[in-house]
Amino acid sequence: MDYKEFIKKYGGDDKITKSDLRDFSALGGSRAEAQKFLDKAAAGKKGYEGKVGEGAYEFAEKAEKFPGTLTNDYFSTAVGDTGNYFGTDSGSIPETVSAPSSDPQAFADQYIGSEEILYGFMDADREDRQTHEIHINNINNAAGHNLQVLANAGGVAIEGIRAGAETYGYDTQYDIAMLGDARERDLVQYTTQVEDTRLRDFKDKDIAYGLNLQNIINSGLVAVAETQGMYSVSGITERGKYDLEIQKIRSAGDQDIARTNMMGSLMAGFWNSIG
């Protein structure tokens, strides 16, 4: 049975248990295979996402739980061969084991001692890997927690900034609206005041102009009347002077005519008296 078959048979419920290891041993699985497969499963090899129970690890620690270890692993290599006497699951242990003794008890002692050394290395390696994985998991969990804390803090900060910006925007819009209303009121008031002032100024100027014009007209009428009066008096005076002179001339002429008539009458009487 290889690792893929092991996971397919015992990892379907997402957890490898002590019972799974007992069944694996009963089917002839070796202790070395069990420990190797458990290590791979714990590392998530071949996409396995389940767990390995503590009972499974404890079961795999006990060599007596795997009766097929000597027959299935050790004797897979011919006696006298200088190859690996720990079977196919010995990991990276150097292939330096001497040929087994012909004494079965000595052979068993030698094999068990070698197995204990081998599994000691494997236990240490597994513990180191488990410690490392726990450490890495703790680091990842702490990092994830810190990242989440930072993300939450950043989200809170961003929300605070957004809320502050919105509040500032609302306040600014309100201030702009109030300023616009105030400017509109000031403009209306200023326009009204300027218009009132202009109208009053025009009215005052119209009144002043009318008064001045009336005064000018009145003054002109007075001047005209005075001038007319002066001309009338002057004309009457001059006419009187002319009438007096004409009367004097007429009187003088009448006197000259009367004298001439009297002289004529005297001359006529004289000539009549002579004739």
Image (cartoon, rainbow, N blue to C red):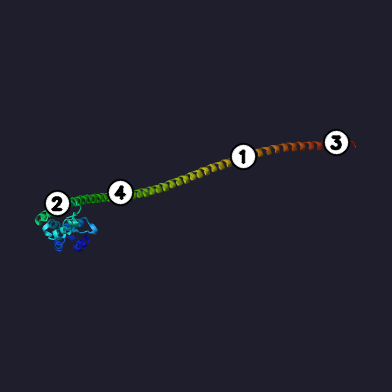
Q: Nearer the viewer, residue 181 or 77?
A: 77
Quote the CA–CA distance across marks 3 and 2. 213 Å
Q: Secondary structure at mark 1?
A: helix
> Which residue bears the numbered disc 3?
267
Q: Residues within 10 Å of mark 1 (few under 14, many from 20)?
A: few
Quote the CA–CA distance across marks 3 and 1. 58 Å
Q: Earlier in the sequence, mark 3 or mark 2?
A: 2
Q: Earlier in the sequence, mark 2 or mark 4?
A: 2
- Quarter of the image with the C terminus in it: top right
- Answer with the quarter of the image where residue 242 lies: top right
Quote the CA–CA distance across marks 4 and 1. 94 Å
Q: Secondary structure at mark 3?
A: helix
Q: Nearer the viewer, mark 3 or mark 1?
A: 1
Instruction: Check if mark 3's residue and mark 4's residue have beta carbons within 8 Å.
Output: no
> Which residue bears the numbered disc 4?
161
Instruction: Check if mark 2's residue and mark 4's residue have beta carbons within 8 Å.
Output: no
> Which residue bears the numbered disc 1?
227
Q: Residues within 10 Å of mark 4 (few under 14, many from 20)?
A: few
Q: Earlier in the sequence, mark 3 or mark 1?
A: 1
> Which residue bears the numbered disc 2?
117
Q: Earlier in the sequence, mark 1 or mark 2?
A: 2
Q: Nearer the viewer, mark 1 or mark 2?
A: 2
Q: Nearer the viewer, mark 3 or mark 4?
A: 4
Q: As displayed, is residue 249 above or below residue 178?
A: above
At label 1, the amino acid type is: Thr
Instruction: Check if mark 3's residue and mark 2's residue have beta carbons within 8 Å.
Output: no
